[in-house]
Amino acid sequence: MKDDIIKLLKENLEGGEGENVKENIISKIYYNELDTLEEVPKSNEYNEITEKVRIAERRVFKEKSEEAIKQYMDLIYEREGIEAEEQFKLGFKLAVRIIIECLR
């Protein structure tokens, strides 16, 4: 993430993509065309937990036990935590990008 911010700063301070990017970002926000917050985390941890969720889900339907439901819910909460962190990072990157572009 740090490298992404440094790269973005360098591009914008050295001329980068210019005024069109500023207008594009502002227009995309205005017309609700900015889809950056719909990305799925791309980490091994997230993929492993997602697979565990699938297995636990099958177990819930098969066994219908309280223990299976509890394990399933715990895994869902863990996966949601990863998703929330990723969404925060994406939102922060977007905010920095908007600030940089608006200051140009």
Image (cartoon, helix red, strand yellow):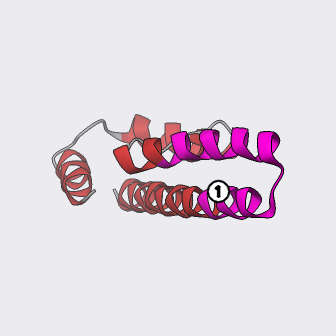
Between residues 11 and 54, which one lies in front from this camera angle? 54
Up/down of 76 relative to 57, above or below = below
Q: Residue at x 63, y 64 (%)?
A: 74
Instruction: Answer whether residue 62 is magenta in the image.
Output: yes
Can you tell which quarter of the image residue 5 is in? bottom left
Horizontal side of 58 relative to 43 (left or right) equals: right
Q: Is residue 31 visible?
A: no
User: Dot 1, how many residues are within 10 Å of its Cα: few (below 14), some (14-19), or many (20+)?
Assistant: some
Q: Secondary structure at mark 1?
A: helix
Left or right: 25, with 32 as reference point: left
**Residue 55 appears at what percent x and percent y?**
61, 40
Q: Which residue is mark 1?
A: 76
| Residue in the picture at 63% in, 39% down | 54
Q: Where is residue 22? Give x, y as percent.
A: 45, 44
Kind of residue sitting beneath label 1: Ile
Tell me the magenta residue range. Answer: 49-75
Q: Residue shown at 26%/49% (left/top)?
A: 8
- Point out residue 57 in the picture as x, y percentages from the top left corner: 71, 43
* Quadrant showing the N terminus: bottom left
Task: Name the main secondary structure of what is drawn in magenta.
Answer: helix
Question: Horizontally, is 101 left or right of 29 in the view?
Answer: left
Q: Position of residue 75 (x, y in %)?
A: 60, 58
Q: Residue at x 72, y 63 (%)?
A: 67
4 or 76: nearer the eye? 76
